[in-house]
Image: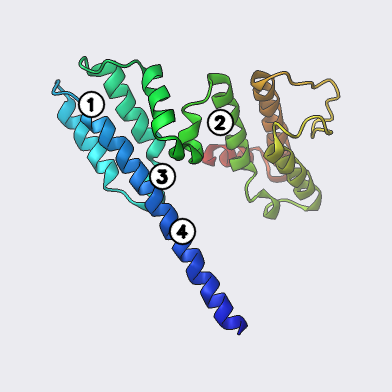
Amino acid sequence: MNFFRSILAFFKKKERAKSKNLFFDESIDALFTFLLSRIGTNTGSNAATVHINNYLSLRGAERREKLAESYLFAEKYLTDIDTNFNLTKEELRSLVKVQYAKLLSIPKFALIFKEEEEQEFELCRTFLLEVLSGLTDLLGESGSQQIQELKKYVDDIPNAFPRKNPLNDVTFNPSGFSDWVHFVRKLSFHCFNILAEKLGEETALKRYDKA
């Protein structure tokens, strides 16, 4: 009986994943159909159309992974190059946020529509998490514990405050994303020093370059 339950659970999971992919594909199709419809016949319009259609030929995870950069390409063409397009970048983003709001559940795409300070914070935080990912297997016990504590803290940012931070900085009292950006950079230096001490500076540099 447990075997059949496991099989059933597996197929249900596959079906949910398929439905999710279909949902995102349909929403992405709708967004880029709209963007394509607004491209005029100026010089370069054909190249822009080909670029977007090449993106639309992708499917699944790759399509979601490249959604943000493909949208930014179309946005830049429409608002900076196409003289027939009558919306500013801000107006276009406001429209997309409302009409294609479901796509904002894709984190990299949602980041486009945040304020600059929050964008910088998310990028810094994401970069540090990439550096921290999988490090515990490379370090000794003490180093692994330090990295685990650091990763848990960074995972919880900005909700990690006011608990004790990895730098033991009792003066840290963030009032906004700019304070967090500065602090995450300090955490990144702290992480680099741990890696340099345990693995050597060259290995630490390679880890940061890889992220």
**Pointers 4 and 1 in contact (C-beta within 8 Å):** no
**Pointers 2 and 4 in contact (C-beta within 8 Å):** no
Sequence order check, earlier mark of 2 and 4: 4
Alpha carbon of mark 4 to alpha carbon of mark 1: how far? Answer: 32 Å
x 20%, y 37%: residue: 50
Sequence order check, earlier mark of 3 and 1: 1
x 84%, y 30%: residue: 168
Q: Amino acid at mark 4?
A: Ala
- Residue at disc 1, secondary structure: loop
Task: Tell me the crowding category of disc 2: few under 14, some 14 to 19, or many 20 or more residues within 10 angstroms, Cα based.
Answer: some
Task: Tell me the crowding category of disc 4: few under 14, some 14 to 19, or many 20 or more residues within 10 angstroms, Cα based.
Answer: few
Alpha carbon of mark 3 to alpha carbon of mark 2: how far? Answer: 18 Å
Sequence order check, earlier mark of 4 and 3: 4
Quadrant (top left/top right/bottom left/bottom right) for the N terminus: bottom right
Percent coordinates x, y for residue 142 in the rendering: 81, 48
Residue under label 4:
17
* Residue 136 left/right relative to 24: right
Sequence order check, earlier mark of 2 and 1: 1
Q: Amino acid at mark 2?
A: Leu
Quadrant (top left/top right/bottom left/bottom right) for the C terminus: top right
Residue under label 2:
123
The quarter of the picture where residue 149 lies is top right
Task: Tell me the crowding category of disc 3: few under 14, some 14 to 19, or many 20 or more residues within 10 angstroms, Cα based.
Answer: many
Sequence order check, earlier mark of 3 and 2: 3
Disc number for residue 209: none
Q: Amino acid at mark 3?
A: Arg
Residue under label 1:
38
The quarter of the picture where residue 196 lies is top right
The quarter of the picture where residue 118 lies is top right
- Residue at disc 4, secondary structure: helix
Alpha carbon of mark 2 to alpha carbon of mark 4: how far? Answer: 27 Å
Which of pointers 2 and 4 indicates the residue nearer the eye?
Answer: 4
